[in-house]
Image: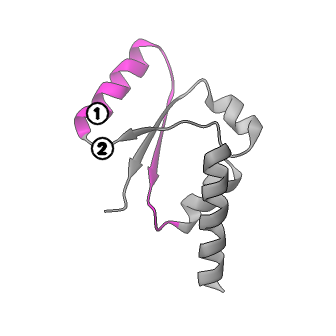
Amino acid sequence: ALIMNTIYMQFIAKQNHEQALVRWQDIDTTAELENALSVAKQNKQYTLLEFYAHWCTSCKRIEATVFADPEVVQKLAQFNLLRVDMTN
């Protein structure tokens, strides 16, 4: 059941990712993070920092449900959205 749930959530997340309007800025280095935070501070913009992993079923569920919700997408449009991939 866990394997089927994982496969299903990956499928849903992939479909919703293509439809989602939430656009994350991928952060790969500390320098990128510092720069993105500096720009957000200059723009007086709040930042949402998401830690994500390809194997994380909870991450995929949140992406497929919460981050696909049009109301959430609208609210997050005013945020500086940063994503750190913790897969490796």
Which residue does the image show at 49% across and 38% down from the upper left?
24
- What's the magenta region? 30-56
Residue 1 point in image, percent of width and height: 66, 86
Is 67 placed left or right of 25 in the picture?
right
Checking the image for residue 32, the label placed there is 1
Which element carries disc 1, helix, strand or loop?
helix
The amino acid marked with disc number 1 is: Glu
Residue 49 point in image, percent of width and height: 46, 40
Density class for disc 1 (Cα within 10 Å; few <14, some 14-19, many ≥20) is some
Which residue does the image show at 54% across and 36% down from the upper left?
23
Q: Are marks 1 and 2 in contact (CB under 8 Å)?
A: yes
> Which residue is identified by label 2?
28
Checking the image for residue 13, the label placed there is none
Viewer-closest of 88 and 19:
19
Q: Is residue 37 magenta?
A: yes
Is 12 located above or below residue 4 in the figure? above
Is 35 located above or below residue 28 in the figure? above
Q: Is residue 17 magenta?
A: no
Check the picture and name the quadrant holding the C terminus.
Answer: bottom left
Density class for disc 2 (Cα within 10 Å; few <14, some 14-19, many ≥20) is few
